[in-house]
Image: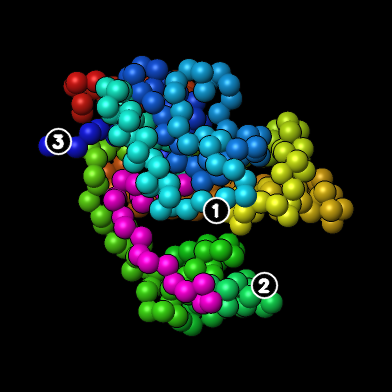
Amino acid sequence: MTPPPVIAIFGPTAVGKTRVAAEVACALRGEIVSADSMQVYAGLPALTDQPPAALLAAAPHHLIGAVPLDEEYSAGRFAREAAGAIEQITARGRLPILAGGTGLYIRALLGGFGFGARGSTAARRKWEAFISERGAEAAAKELSRLEPAAAAAIDTTNPRRLARALEAAEAGRPVSAERDRLWSAKSRYRVLSFGLEMPRRELYRMIDERVDAMLECGAIDEVKAAGCERVSRTVLQAIGFSEICRLLAGEATHDEIAAAIRQKSRRYAKRQLTWMRKMPDIVRIDLAGRTHAEAAQMIIERVRSAFPER
């Protein structure tokens, strides 16, 4: 049986994926499956930059604001839920459009990667305590000793991923080997992937504007309502959440947290671009000198050529 077609639109934060995906969906009778690890949560639309009402109304969206803030979320869970959404979209005769910037989630789904069994709770708690007591820098040095390739491959400022990598390295399940298998896995779909990019200076300007708008348009109230002590560890990793908690606790000024969020967002964009360069057979679209509508039209034409039935 011929695998169903899936369109993937990837790119760094603030590049305009949401707008482009909505235009493509409208033209091709598509439905959008969000591949964003934070937009999946309910209650944080401004903080996580969820699509505005006009775009949500323009095309059906899936996995946006769908998970309570006290629940953990993972790439494995996303792969299961996104695959279910794609199956339903395909059954309706519509085109699944995967759009987002969480590279691990996209490859977990498209590669059909099977996540190995989790280690023991005791081992995980041991490394979490290590990070809490001695700090991420000491933990990163320990990971470099146990598995240098993993230390170079993951975001060592992310306590959750750092703890998981240390646990895996200690147990003889190197994260670097898992990533290699993830990237080389054969897709379960007929995938046409597009990567949006723009000059770094312009991207950083867009990121700064987004951070300012997010702070002015409700993100602080969202975090206050969510409660800094009542959310899952996954939510605590959302860019801006811990910084706003510091603001609410009187530990930082508005200007200080804005600068920290801008810096963290830029670093995240760099990692996203690294993921994009590794994605196989991706069609890269430079937005320099192009509007989002023009980028969407390029995607529409390529999809119609690759999948004439659309």
Q: Residue at x 42, y 67 (%)?
A: 118
Instruction: Give left or right: position of 219 versus 156.
Output: right
User: Which quarter of the image is occupied by the C terminus?
Assistant: top left
Q: What element carries label 1?
A: loop
Q: Which of marks 3 and 1 is nearer the N terminus?
A: 3
Stretch of the chain drawn in magenta: 102-123
Instruction: Give left or right: position of 118 versus 269.
Output: left
Q: Whole-percent x and y of residue 295?
A: 40, 26
Q: Which amino acid does label 1 sit on?
A: Glu
Residue 72 image label: 1
Q: Is residue 72 above or below residue 206?
A: below
The answer to whether marks 1 and 2 mark residues whose Cβ atoms lie closer than 8 Å is: no
Q: Mark 3 points at which residue?
A: 2
Q: Which of marks 1 and 2 is nearer the N terminus?
A: 1
Q: Residues within 10 Å of mark 2 (few under 14, many from 20)?
A: few
Q: Can residue 145 be seen in this view?
A: yes
Residue 132 image label: 2
Q: Can residue 270 be seen in this view?
A: no
In this view, the residue in front, 51 or 206, is 51
Where is residue 92, by image quadrant? Answer: top left
Q: Whole-percent x and y of residue 123?
A: 51, 77
Q: Earlier in the sequence, mark 3 or mark 2?
A: 3
Q: Which amino acid does label 2 sit on?
A: Ser
Residue extending furthest toward the left: 1
In this view, the residue in front, 242 or 224, is 224
Q: What residue type is labelled 3?
A: Thr
